[in-house]
Amino acid sequence: MARIVMKFGGTSVADLDRIRNVARHVKREVDAGNEVAVVVSAMAGKTNELVGWAQQMPRASGANLPFFDAREYDAIVASGEQVSAGLLAIALQSIGIDARSWQGWQIPIRTDGAHGAARIVDIDASTLIERFGRGQVAVVTGFQGIGPDNRIATLGRGGSDTSAVAVAAAVKADRCDIYTDVDGVYTTDPRIEPKARRLSKISFEEMLEMASLGAKVLQVRSVELAMVHKVRTFVRSSFDDPDAPGMGDPVNPPGTLICDEDEIVEQQVVTGIAYAKDEAQISLRRVSDRPGVAAGIFGPLAEAGINVDMIVQNISEDGSRTDMTFTVPSGDVDKALSVLEKVRETVGFDVLQHEAGMMKVSVIGIGMRSHAGVAATAFKALSERGINIRAITTSEIKISILIDGAYGELAVRALHSVYGLDKQ
Ligand code: ADP
Ligand code: ASP
Ligand code: MG
């Protein structure tokens, strides 16, 4: 007997037939004698619809709010999960499984007060464990908890992955299975490169980079939690036949295992390619070159809640002026420009330029630590296809390159092929 947390994403619960199919996956694990808690997302497209409704509402007049009341935003967008959890509980009951739905606040899953992007701070596992004892399946709404203000708080888009791993850590589950619309983590997004291959294992560090650099198969925070709490996490498909041979394998279920580096015997130099669309480039030209300039630029941007990513600064030619380029999400450009205009005098720069529609492609692999020439290979592959590089950043296990978004898919495929990822 094992204790398992099973998470089903939006496409897995997209309609009533799929919810019935999910119930069969759950039944298989219950029938095998396991203790099971389930975490669900909203039905596919539902959260987008709810976010759209919230965004269309006018701001309260005179309210000193940056966008709209984030607590009400959370009350709206968290509702999708309530529906799918209730439907799945009914589907389970109809096939003879004792089940009930739980909303985040009922467990409770406690979060901090950052409405819209809250972090889980604590989960009281006692109720869930007591229900395991009764043989009951808890169907928990993903993506949400309750903040210190006693109101619903959501965890940021894709947050049900994080709910699932956090619940798994809290109940000390043997495994957390993330069921989605692909049968594992691939060398790159299989929607862009059909030659992408499924990885049987990927290290926590690499998965963290893949997720942070755009691979939305897992939310970044869920990987962090899995790494810190050593949760054995599998990514697998809900579209597989629930009763196919091997589906209930307790040790090696089909899918990709996210694990410690030393569990991976044959480590490749490059493991995967990730991409992030909708990046915008902002350049400050002829910035005065003196201590305090970077702080004067990025401090106010951070205070405005703008997530700055790649930063490139030139060494100045004459010691007096330099150029500073960085990227922000396209949706934040206007806000960033207005912040920068306010500091133009104090920082001292001549021209402010910006361009949206950029894409960041990244090459990721732990093997890079001990191999030279990985970056040069990427630059050559892009140059052979006439793709211009706008900015580059590197870390020990990744290289990120900013390019024009129109060449994004071509670049992903070129990099995927140049490291032989479609062949191994
Ligand atoms: P869910 O609704 O189940 O949470 P998501 O849409 O959030 O599913 O994540 C699954 C999607 O992630 C896949 O359909 C796939 O297009 C995308 N994806 C991006 N990069 C990868 C990758 N490296 N491996 C697998 N899937 C990826
Ligand atoms: N339903 C939420 C979203 O679409 C959470 C999730 O699916 O993980 O972002
Ligand atoms: Mg997701």
Image (cartoon, helix red, strand yellow):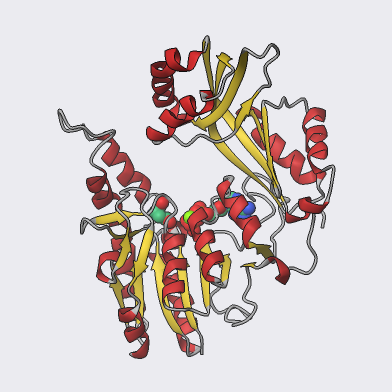
Q: Nearer the viewer, residue 314 or 423?
A: 314
Q: In this view, does 89 lie to the left or right of 310?
A: left
On the question of residue 88 being in view, the answer is no
Instruction: Give coordinates of residue 283: x percent, y percent.
Output: 56, 20
Q: In this view, does 340 lie above or below 105?
A: above
Q: Is residue 371 left or right of residue 324?
A: right
The outermost residue toward the front is 291
Q: In this view, does 335 lie to the left or right of 201?
A: left
Instruction: Give coordinates of residue 281: x percent, y percent.
Output: 56, 25
Image quarter for residue 89?
bottom left
Instruction: Give coordinates of residue 21: x percent, y percent.
Output: 45, 71
* Ligand 2 visible in quadrant: bottom left
Q: Which of 228 and 81 is in front in this view?
A: 228
Q: Is residue 373 above or below residue 270?
A: above
Q: What residue lies at 28% left-to-right and 33% top-to-bottom? A: 66
Q: Which of 89 and 421 is in front in this view?
A: 421
The outermost residue toward the top is 350
Q: What residue lies at 36% left-to-right and 62% top-to-bottom? A: 121
Q: Which of 123 and 173 is in front in this view?
A: 123
On the question of residue 293 being in view, the answer is yes
Q: In this view, does 256 lie to the left or right of 346?
A: right
Q: What residue lies at 41% left-to-right and 29% top-to-bottom? A: 300
Q: What residue lies at 51% left-to-right and 70% top-to-bottom? A: 229
- Quarter holding the C terminus is bottom right
Instruction: Give coordinates of residue 331: x percent, y percent.
Output: 43, 31
Q: In this view, does 222 lie above or below 334?
A: below
Number of numbered discs overlaid on the protein picture: 0
